[in-house]
Amino acid sequence: MIAILGAGVMGETFIAGLLASGTAASDLVMSEKFAARAAEMSAKYRVPVREPAAAAAEADVILIVVKPHDVAPLLALISGDVRPGTIVVSLAAGITLADLHRGLGTGVVCMRAMPNTPALVGAGMTVLSVDANTSAADEARIKALLDSVGETACLPEELQDAVTAISGSGPAYVFAFMEALEKAGVEMGLPAEVCRKLVQQTVYGASKLAMESETDPGELRRRVTSPGGTTQAALTEFNAGGFGDLIDRAAHAARDRSQELGSAGQRG
């Protein structure tokens, strides 16, 4: 039995992803503190709703999909009902394996994962970190579960702040670029709805090409850049503005802020 504690947007994403991947609704249970939302999710997916402690008691896998500041109270609520050997996976940013063990004790198998928002359309990138004593079978089981909403990589916990900076926050960087490119196109006279489609398909196509090619992004960039051509003119402006250095500084700023929030115990 898989318990999903928290049926917000990301919780619903995993419910839908698991059902789409072949998990039966009868093998899922969920909890949600807002009664209207719980009723909506139960009616939509036919997944039973329980109080958190009851859901935890039924499960051999628990996904914690609540806001970071709600994790500690939730762990206190379920700690007496989680059975030894249960796999508990936190998807809340900044919640460490040590935090989970403090809340649940040492008898459970603790993992943490950082998904990103493209999981909402089945194209997420999630990074999983596990305890040193986690079995290969348990890690593989949870990786398969997370794969229901996209792709999953396994990395040591100390790299999770860097993961947050690259894939966790990364979609926002892409959206900011798209927003700016749309604005430039409209200023040059393109109809807004057409310009949006141009930008969306271009970003999608470039990503698909990069993913399906064995060539690194630098070489792909060079292949589309003719000396003295239009692309070269644009890239010259990027370089003059310090584009590469700006991306580097931005990623490091996100990584550093993730570290600060974790160290300060600010789970928001």
Image: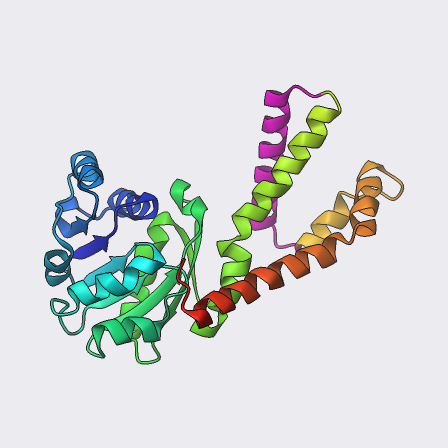
Tell me if I can see residue 118 in this picture: yes
Query: In front here: 27 or 252?
Result: 252
User: How was the colour assigned to the protein in this rendering?
Assistant: rainbow
Q: Residue at x 12, y 50 (%)?
A: 50
Tell me if I can see residue 137 in this picture: no
Task: Indicate the position of residue 54 as horizontal and vertical percent values.
Answer: 10, 57
Task: Indicate the position of residue 130 as horizontal and vertical percent values.
Answer: 35, 72
Residue 241 appears left or right of 39: right
Q: Does the magenta run of residues contain 193? A: yes
Q: In this view, does 130 lie above or below 143?
A: below
Task: Indicate the position of residue 148 as horizontal and vertical percent values.
Answer: 33, 50
Q: Does the magenta run of residues contain 67? A: no
Image quarter of residue 256 = bottom right
Query: In front here: 122 or 160?
Result: 160
Q: Which residue is drawn at 12% across and 70% down?
A: 80
Write the start and end of the magenta stretch as one range: 190-216
Task: Indicate the position of residue 22 as horizontal and vertical percent values.
Answer: 24, 46
Residue 89 appears left or right of 55: right
Q: In this view, does 129 lie above or below 249?
A: below
Which quadrant would the C terminus be assigned to in this image? bottom left
> Chief secondary structure of the magenta span?
helix
Q: In this view, does 249 lie above or below 17?
A: below
Residue 59 appears left or right of 146: left
Q: Which residue is drawn at 83% across and 43% down?
A: 232
Residue 28 appears left or right of 226: left
